[in-house]
Amino acid sequence: MNNDLKPVMEGIFEVGPPSRLNGAICPECNKKFFPKPMVCPHCLGEVQNIELSTEGKIYTYSILRTKPPYGLPQPYAVGWVDLEADGLRIFSLLDPDRISDLDFGKRVTLRVGAIGVDNNGQACLRYYFTPKDGGEQ
Amino acid sequence: MRSVDIIGVGITNFGKHIETSLVELGGRVAIEAIKDAGIKPSQINAGFFANMQAANIFTDFTVGQNVFWQAGINSVPVFNIENACTSGSSAFNLAWMGVASGMYDIAIVVGAEKLVVPNLGLMQAGSTELDTLEGLVVPNAFAMRANLHMATYGTTKEQLAMVAVKNRRHAGLNPLAQFRSPITVEEVLNAPMIADPLTRLSCCPNADGAAAVVLCASDYSRQYTSRSVNVAASVLVTGSYENPCNMAQWDADRRASSIAYERAGLGPQDLDVVECHDAFTISEIVHYEGIGLCPEGEGGRLLESGATSLGGKIPVNPSGGLLSKGHPVAATAVAQIVEGVRQLRGEAGACQVEGAKVFMAECMGADKAGDIKSCTVNILQN
């Protein structure tokens, strides 16, 4: 991976291996969040940084066939992924090279890679989930 | 709170208004609504102007004062309002609140938008949002809901396509709609794919357009017109942003319509005609379920039964909806209310639902955390 590239948004993930998404937990409410909020939106207390699970399964997804934004591949797929260990459903780009393998309930793993450009038109790193081989439910 | 009536309406056709400025579009409908109401501009106590994209596209902002001045309105409070697709109904909700509270006796709402410009691209939530940077654009947000609805409830691609076919059939009766030629299920399914399973004919087109309504305290409306229509309920809610969010349903529809039904003392069985936010075919089906026209998961089958077609039990989008008229964002939700007033006045021409007494306008705006940013439900009654 090109280590000179910046993440698409600062502070969202740690570049691995293994790459991790930066989440947060409120110790009072025991609720987890992604991305990290300023404070817990339920009690306005301080939240603590946590690393989120790198494993999940696809809740829903879609494939965009028309001209993509941010220099993303055409076509590309996005979806909502359930991180069951964290009780969170998060939005994510899905592996552009594995579009034909996507399905509901498909087990997926977190990756970070150089895909597309950022708001300044510069090549950048994005997080995405890729189907786990043989892990289909 | 006082009872509030709508006493005047104005609307342009939705489509291309290349030679007409945003300010002129807004001014035209304001003038039409004021004349329709039978009042003088000096009798208006406040103006509410809705627009979403002018600052982005034309670097125009605080446009309302320019719009209202053309229609003879000055010196009074003027507000400029943006709330995505519900910009127009949010302006309406504020105007209703202003009159219902007793602050104003008469208020005007104008929603106007110009979107027919080269290279507009796909609409998205804003370039500082993480979801947008990860590839979320409006069509794939709705495509994910469509895929989930099909997987969860057995809704079919054909049922989705039938929404576009029905609304286009209705649009053939509406001279103000942009696209009026009939289309078939096969044509919808075979149109270029935008985001699986939504094809180009499953997505509402861009449009320019404007619409206006004049609201008046019910105590005074009879002085000006015999064609007033009562606002039985005006409700705006936002998303709950709970995680995980059920994306096969719109909880906000359910919450907003429940509040509206309670305030109006009515239920879904009392509705005679509905205009809803059919930005994509899947939207209309999920809205049926959210506002209680059918049980959860039954929207596709309700549509297929013909119940929501003109002549059916509860016609939805007799104007042709956004899918046929196009979606001049901030004009859309005001136009829905104008359609409702025309239905309840018996002035809807070939789109008329015979004897319509109760109308609902439902509108929804923007995505956040898999939920929505805003949802409005307005019930009008004769």
Image (cartoon, coloured by chain):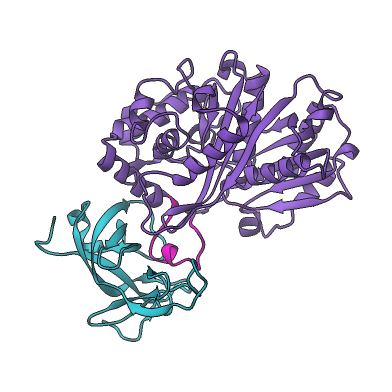
Residue B57: where, in percent of width, then height?
A: 61, 56
Q: Residue furthest left?
A: A134
Q: Is residue B14 visible?
A: no
* Residue B137 to residue A115: above or below: above
Dividing the picture into quadrants, the one containing residue B325 is: top right
Residue A8: where, in percent of width, then height?
A: 40, 74
Residue A113: where, in percent of width, then height?
A: 28, 74
Q: Nearer the viewer, residue B292 or B69?
A: B292
Side (left or right) of B181 relative to B67: left
Q: Is residue B166 visible?
A: yes
Q: Nearer the viewer, residue B66 or A127?
A: A127
Side (left or right) of B24 relative to A56: right
Q: Which chain is cyan?
A: A
Residue pictured at 46% horizontal, 18% vertical: B313
Q: Nearer the viewer, residue B363 or B261?
A: B261
Q: Nearer the viewer, residue B168 or B48?
A: B48
* Residue A101 to residue B361: above or below: below
Colour of chain B in the rendered structure image:
purple
Residue pictured at 33% horizontal, 27% vertical: B301
* Residue A83 to residue B317: above or below: below
Residue pictured at 57% horizontal, 30% vertical: B360
Residue range highlighted in magenta? B124-138
| Main secondary-structure element of the magenta-colored stretch | loop
Dividing the picture into quadrants, the one containing residue B96 is: top right
**Residue B135 within the segment the image draws in magenta:** yes
The image quadrant where one finds the N terminus of chain B is: top right
Side (left or right) of B374 relative to B38: left
The image quadrant where one finds the C terminus of chain B is: top right
Residue B166: where, in percent of width, then height?
A: 43, 25
Side (left or right) of B184 relative to B324: left
Dividing the picture into quadrants, the one containing residue B245 is: bottom left
Q: Residue furthest front?
A: A28
